[in-house]
């Protein structure tokens, strides 16, 4: 198993919560992490029809088997179990008693809100980050990384992305998401997902997205919400506090694995990425997903934003820190350009709250200061290499 940065977060949460939940997309390594960390606990998958039937028909007896807790995998398949689990953990008052995993937030989050509030610590586990891959596994070239992404199966097996992603989309995206949405026209749903991939890194216009797919904006919103709660995409909200100008209030759309985005765009080899029209969007999607992984692995919410005013000035990522606002610009070019800091300089001049040294993540190499910014190459950023 490739060591996961969320391990220390789960260890910390296990000291203070009777229930731990690991949620994230299919095949992101949730079960592997849970079984590695809590090897002494019995493991039960609620994908198993017999176990699921037992949990549905007699939840009290189902849980009574686990005198020392258990790992309950794919618990969203039996959300009613959570009410019985609440009663049991309240009686036992044992920290780190049960570990739940779920590949979707749908019923799981509703159940947590109703039954396990205050009793559960949660980690959202996305595919592997650059820091988790490390020097040994991180692809040598940027284009190879954008093509391969971070799903663990592509690193612990001899498996090509062109073999894995078609099966992933068919097995999980179509089975899980399509069934939940009761989509009748599979080709229409396919087109919707591909159109979302083509819009990663752009302002989200649901009416235009729906029109391009032949569906109503309301339907597009519903379908997108399910993709989002399946951890396939996310909406990056605009930042509007502490600025006096009129600002854009529409969120941006991003995929959470760049290689899934690339496959949906029809990219079938790494070499074609170098000249692909979407290369900038792919790089921006990868960098944003890395920032989200850093925060999720630490047990935090995403809490990332972008900033854009009504005349087009834009900063790719903004987030709050105790010391002030941090801005990040993302540039796919491999050579630093003197106009790159202009947007963050404009932004800093408009803010009426303290701002930190802006960061620029780019498609080249190195880690240095330039024009009042801290500049990080893609590899240095991914591995967390500090500037000398």
Image: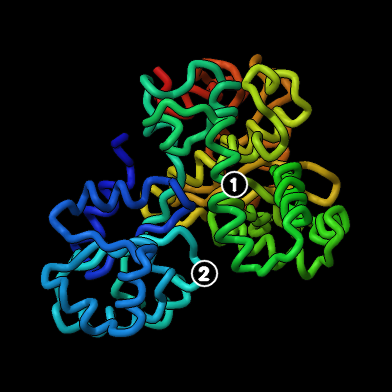
Q: Where is 316 relative to 182, above or below?
A: above
Q: Which residue is at a point 47% across and 76% down the rendered structure image?
A: 110
**Mark 1 falls on what kind of element?**
helix
Q: Residues within 10 Å of mark 2 (few under 14, many from 20)?
A: some
Which residue is labeled 1 in the image?
169
The quadrant holding residue 120 is bottom left
Q: Residues within 10 Å of mark 1 (few under 14, many from 20)?
A: some
Q: Residue 61: x and y, percent?
A: 21, 82
Spot occupied by residue 238 in the image (x, y as percentages of width and height): 68, 55
Where is residue 386? Give x, y as percent: 40, 24
Q: What residue lies at 59% left-to-right and 20% top-to-bottom?
A: 370
| Viewer-closest of 111 and 70 | 70
Residue 304 in view of the camera: no
Q: Viewer-proximal residue, 171 or 294?
A: 171
Indicate the quadrant where residue 82 lies: bottom left
Residue at 24%, 77% in the rendered image: 62
Q: Residue at x 36, y 58 (%)?
A: 22
Q: Is residue 99 left or right of residue 41?
A: right
Q: Is residue 291 above or below residue 130?
A: below
Name the quadrant of the C terminus.
top left
Residue 215 in view:
yes
Instruction: Find residue 343 and report its horizontal and vertical position in percent.
Output: 72, 35
Give the residue at mark 2.
106
Name which quarter of the figure residue 131 lies in. Answer: top left
- Whichever of callouts 1 and 2 sits on the residue coming sooner in the sequence is 2
Q: Closer to the camera: disc 1 or disc 2?
A: 1
Q: Looking at the rendered structure, which numbered label has been put on residue 233?
A: none
State how far apart marks 1 and 2 are (Cα).
19 Å
Question: Secondary structure under badge 2?
Answer: helix
């Amino acid at each position: 198993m490739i060591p996961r940065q969320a391990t220390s977060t789960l260890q910390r949460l296990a000291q203070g919560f009777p229930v731990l939940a690991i949620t994230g997309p299919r095949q992101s390594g949730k079960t592997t992490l849970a079984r590695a960390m809590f090897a002494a606990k019995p493991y039960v998958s609620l994908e198993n029809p017999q176990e699921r039937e037992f949990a549905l028909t007699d939840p009290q007896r189902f849980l009574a088997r686990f005198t020392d807790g258990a790992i309950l995998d794919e618990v969203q398949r039996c959300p009613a179990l959570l009410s019985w689990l609440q009663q049991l953990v309240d009686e036992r008052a044992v920290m780190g008693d049960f570990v739940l995993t779920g590949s979707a937030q749908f019923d799981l989050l509703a159940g947590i809100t109703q039954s396990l509030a205050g009793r559960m610590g949660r980690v959202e586990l996305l595919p592997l980050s650059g820091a988790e891959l490390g020097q040994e596994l991180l692809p040598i070239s940027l284009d190879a990384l954008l093509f391969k992404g971070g799903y663990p199966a592509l690193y612990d097996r001899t498996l090509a992305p062109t073999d894995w992603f078609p099966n992933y989309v068919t097995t999980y995206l179509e089975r899980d998401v399509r069934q939940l949405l009761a989509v009748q026209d599979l080709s229409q749903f396919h087109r919707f997902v591909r159109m979302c991939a083509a819009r990663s890194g752009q302002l989200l216009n649901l009416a235009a997205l729906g029109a391009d797919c032949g569906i109503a904006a309301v339907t597009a919103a519903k379908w997108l919400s399910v993709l989002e709660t399946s951890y396939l995409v996310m909406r990056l909200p605009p930042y509007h506090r502490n600025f006096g100008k009129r600002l854009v209030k529409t969120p941006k759309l991003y995929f959470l694995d760049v290689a899934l985005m690339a496959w949906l765009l029809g990219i079938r080899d790494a070499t074609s990425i170098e000249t692909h029209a979407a290369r900038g969007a792919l790089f921006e999607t990868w960098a944003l997903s890395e920032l989200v992984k850093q925060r999720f692995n630490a047990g935090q919410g995403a809490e990332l934003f972008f900033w854009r005013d009504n005349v087009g000035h834009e900063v790719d990522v903004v987030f709050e820190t105790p010391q002030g606002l941090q801005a990040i610009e993302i540039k796919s070019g491999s050579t630093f350009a003197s106009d790159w800091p202009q947007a963050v300089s404009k932004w800093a001049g408009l803010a009426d709250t303290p701002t930190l040294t802006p960061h620029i993540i780019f498609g080249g190499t190195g880690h240095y200061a330039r024009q009042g910014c801290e500049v990080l190459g893609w590899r240095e950023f991914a591995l967390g290499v500090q500037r000398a």
